[in-house]
Amino acid sequence: MSPDPHRLARTARFHRSLVAVSLALSWAASCRAATLCVDQHGKTGCVATISAAVAAAAPGDTIQVDAGFYHEDIVITQSLSLVGEGRASTIIDATGLSNGILIDGYGNPGLSQIIVKGFTIQNANFEGVLVQNALDVTIFGNVVRGNDLSLQPTGPACPGLPAFETGEGNDCGEGIHLMGVDHSTVALNDVEQNAGGILISDETDTSHDNVITRNFIMNNSYNGGITLASHPAYLTTGNAKLAYGIYDNTVSDNDSIHNGFGGPPGGAGIALFAPGAGNRTYANSIVGNRLIGNSLSGIAIHNNANFSDTAAPPNPDVNDNAIVGNYIAGNGPDAVASTAVPTGISIFGLTPVVDLVVEANVIEDEGIDVAMNSASNLDLHLNALAGTGVGVANLNRLGQVNARENWWGCSGGPGAQGCTTISGSAKAVDYTPWLGWSSTFPNRHDHDHDNDCDHDGDGDHSHW
């Protein structure tokens, strides 16, 4: 069998994305002052807890953690590398505690150059890993599982959650949470059975230039797989700032599967949200991900306010984002965008969503492949709109979709036998010319559509 050029291209992109990880690891190896060890069985020269090693470490040190079961809430306040013996054998269990690991740059300004790899992190009341106001952090090769245990879906949403978490009441912060973080990497982690998967937010500062890549995110109950959500700023003074902003992040080559089925609000495979005044989630790249079987749409893009008065606060912003080369199949509807059937990509804006690029995505097994519900223009090109019904739904009478040069599931174009169709305002969807062949796109069997999330069919994610 000849190599799949699409998979080879994605592999090349992945290798480039790990350059930053390699450089960070090299830095830790060359510049560390010392290596400390943690062992629960009395190994000579080691301490018995991770927190004791963190307290004893100097900036730049490496802490090697032997296999064991560590009941701790670890707080990192300086540059260091925290390395577990292996994620299957080195367990941080935070039962009854706030977090598994807190990387606290909020209380320690200028915090940078942190590595966490090789652990299972589980059972925290809030986040498994919370990174706050830090630079150059690498979260690599961990399992983050079963956190957010304080969540009470039928009562007070998340009792005890810190006040700086202004928008996490319905998910207790999710499994991995970057807040006010930049130039950091979250790669090759399994994130599962939390209230939500991976969250990037901006309560305490901007979050920008981060890379979220090659993570496996599945069965997170109450929210989505990966969420970029601008939230109200946490302010301790009279500063009038409404939100800091989330921008220039890259979300690439992740698997986000079967999230959001534990109850409302539910979750998309990937979500970009700017719900209120001044919220900004813009200029991010969503590239080469697989988004399968989530309770909401595969990709959801929402803003939820429009202030027409010039004296009113700034409108929310989910503009200038790029949705490119993703595989999307078998997800759910998006009630916010007014879709009642499975939906691939849903776009909703009370404020017009502008300069959004949607190109080269493969969408299958959806009732609506792309739903546009915004009084704005959408550029939609070189996609495989090969779902079960509607290729493009224009749900806003003031919206306009430039849908030239897409594949509609057959050579005849939208509405032909075997092709997807157009719904809503057809006059506002420009679809001529269309692509008359499908060889531009990978075959559905090149994707792991059976939801076991590994390409070789053995259910083992270790090759990641």
Image (spheres, grey):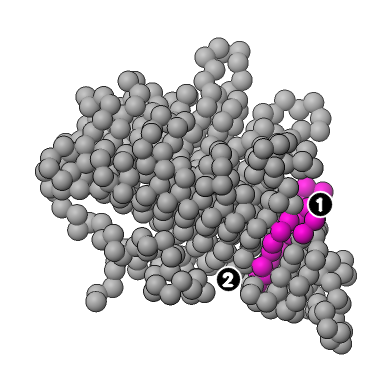
Residue drawn 72% across the image and 79% down it: 67
**C-alpha span from label 1 to label 2:** 26 Å
User: Which of marks 2 and 1 precedes in the sequence?
Assistant: 2
Q: Where 353 sits versus 258, above or below?
A: above
Q: Is residue 404 left or right of residue 327?
A: left
Q: Quadrant of residue 172?
A: top right
Rendered location of residue 166, percent (x, y): 70, 36
Residue drawn 81% across the image and 80% down it: 39
Question: In the rendered structure, which segment of residues is drawn in magenta?
Answer: 95-124
User: Which dot marks residue 108?
Assistant: 1
User: Which dot marks residue 33?
Assistant: none
User: Which dot marks residue 22?
Assistant: 2
Relative depth, front residue between 383 and 94: 94
Whether residue 270 is visible, yes or no, is no
Name the element at disc 1.
loop
Dot 2 crowding, Cα within 10 Å, few <14, some 14–19, many 20+: few
Rendered location of residue 360, percent (x, y): 31, 50
